[in-house]
Image (cartoon, coloured by chain):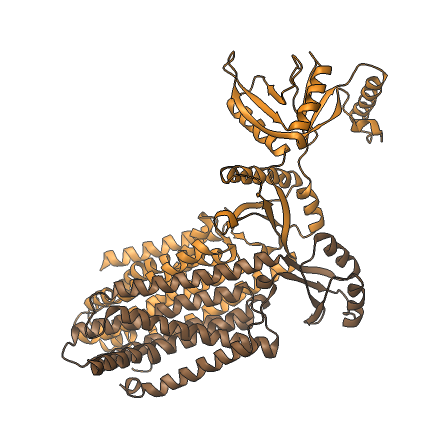
Amino acid sequence: MISRRILAIVIIVLAVLLAWFDLSAYRPFRLGLDLRGGSHLVYEADVSSLSAADIKDAMSALREVIERRINAFGVAEPVIQIETAGLGNDAKHRLIVELPGVTDLNEALKVIDVTPVLEFKTERPDGPEKETIRAAYQEAQEALIAGKPLPDNPRLQEDPEFVSTPLTGRYLKRARVDFGQQSINPSISLEFDKTGGEIFAELTKANIDKRIGIYLDGRPLSAPVVREEISDGRAEITGQFTLTEARELVRNLNLGALPVAIKLVSTETVGATLGQEAFDQGVRAGIIGLLIVAVFMILWYRLNGLVAVVSLAIYIVLVLVVFKLLLVTLTAAGIAGFILSLGIAVDANVLIFERLKEELWQHEHLHEAIRDGFAHAWLPIRDSNLSSIISALILFWFGTSLIRGFALTLTIGIVISMFTAITVTRNLLLAVAPVHKTRLVHFLFSSGFRR
Amino acid sequence: MFIINHRKIFFMISGLLVLTSLIGLFRYGLKLGTDFTGGTIMEIEYSGTRPELALIKSPIDALALGPVSLQTIGERSVLLRLRTITEDEHQALKQTLSGLEKRYSSIGPAVGEELARRGIIAILIVVVLIILFIAFVFRHVSKPVNSWKYGVIAILALIHDIAIPTGVMALLGRFYGVEVDALFLTALLTILGLSVNDTIVVFDRIRENLKQHTGEKFDEVVGRSLNEIIVRSINTSLTVILVLLAIYFFGSASTKYFALVMAVGMFVGTYSSIFIASPLLVSWQKWSARVK
């Protein structure tokens, strides 16, 4: 008996600690765009020219380039996902981009829509032009040191060391990591298409023993030295790469050729105020609903009802802990799933109490009645919840992101509700139940309009 | 026993409700929102007084974006609906409207169709798995009614529980212009889960009583089980409906009709487990006995 009560106190203390964790700022809840405002963009990739094996690579390369661009744009916690819909050749490959807090679509789209540019540049010949640009840079640097605004000189747009050539990522067929025979360092081989190969042959012929700069998005990647004219449309970049660097570079180069063309197929924007409103109202509705349920449970099930309300509170605390730890993104649909699981959690308690009422007539000892009540209520709780979990798992498997959010919170909720109904409610009830039945005890453990 | 004895009345009530729903559904159809059909929705809030709708509309028409429908929301907002537009068209549209853009969505038709298709596939798979699951769980209860029949009846109850809220939605669409959105699909899926959940709890009681009261006739066992379980069923659905009503009255506008449809589904779901599914078991058993 005493150990029961100690256990009950331990459970409640633990729950209070976890509630404190829920309310703490550590790992804040992730709200979906519909609840905090932001933009949701769906791009469709044109993969018709790719073989099935290359699609996956192309899509993850696409994802990375977009992610880099968004990070450069300075969006907090962007979510970028690849979604494949349909099967086989009909499959649609999409890129879903979620930008929390971004409500000016125009700005966001500008950043994403710019195709990454791969450029090849040759050394700028020494001469007055190079000197002018250098002088402009010198001036800018001095201005910066002096804390003055940058001079408005168009020369600053140019690179003093390199000049642009017609060769760009447009002509790159593909790049891959290679291992040279003389060196253990990996090298990178590039393959141009026909036109690219011709331009490259001319460039290399004119620039033997000089560097060719490889630029991505205007930033220099590397500048290998040309050793001889290359006419087969293939180039090799050797250098002191580690394997990781080489791989990264290859990926970037393949990106420069833009693996797939993308098309914006749908956009959604929720203003921050609307999202906040939806969130506040959702929370308010949840709290009011819970209070009504609590009042009903206590009036109808008396002491049991009170125990159930405590158990439900613990249930909510636990679910929120899981949401926090698994970084579940809460959307309006997700919250609906959670509220539904709340209903299921109440049901488990109701099933137990109705059962308990029946057992109460058959047993001399209250504790036996409670134990039997729980044992008998377990089967319907298990079976009915299993069927709900089956539904939720299928929805998760087949659903779009909205349905998935719902299925996920529902599944988490159901699993935890089974745990709290069977362990928490049971231990709390056993802790408060006296051993012998008196009239008062009978009243407290009964329900409904009966005395 | 009251419910079992008068089961034909309840069958008729349900039959009538389902029939009305189906007629409503086929006559009016569902008013599908842009989530399913593709298209654009834009909500604009004006800081001062809202201009006359005609004044808002004429500059939009000048942009030639196809048919545009305007609807007022609350005191200061207006909702625009039009075809799927490109981002350039969106920017041009924004220029012509003086208010603040609160919400904007432009969904490609293919994306919408896919949501509907995936939803339907998911529902079908769930239905099949549930029949199998129930047949498995009730496999030890093959007398006097085969376990797979429990599954079939659970699905019949499910169709009943899905049909009525869908009918309600069709009527709401016809008379109040309420659109079916992705949340409605979620509501249906939820009703699906709860309906079966509830039916299983009731069937479980029958399963247990069949073991304990082997002497009784099948209809008596079912009647006894219903008496034992009815309070639980009402209380459970009552608590859920209370929460849903709270969402309906105090929740955000976007979840209002979701809550309403769910509440209807919850109500008919509980009703069907007690007044339809279990009496159907009895009818089926009697019918099989007569055929033999």
Looking at the picture, does residue A64 appear above or below residue B108?
above
Asked if residue A447 shows in the view, the reply is no
Residue B269 placement: quadrant: bottom left
For the C terminus of chain A, which image quadrant? bottom left
Q: Which chain is brown?
A: B
Please state the horizontal and vertical placement of residue A273, each as a whole percent of the image.
65, 59
**In the rendered view of the protein, which quadrant contains the N terminus of chain A?**
bottom left
Residue A44 horizontal/vertical position (percent): 59, 48
Q: Residue B41 placed where, x, y %?
A: 66, 63
Left/right of residue A351 with respect to residue B106 in the rendered view = left
Residue A257 in view of the camera: yes
- Chain letter for orange? A
Whether residue A81 is situated above or below residue B168 in the rendered picture:
above
Decide which of A117, A269 is in the foreground and name it.
A117
Residue at the image position 60 percent from the left and 19 percent from the top: A237
B233 or A130: which is nearer to us?
A130
Q: Position of residue A302 (x, y in %)?
A: 34, 74
Q: Quadrant of residue B230?
A: bottom left
Give B169 or B235, whichever is nearer the viewer: B169
Q: Is residue A115 above or below residue B191?
A: above
Residue B64 left/right relative to A282? right
Point 68% across, 60% down: residue: B102
To which quarter of the image does residue B6 belong?
Answer: bottom left
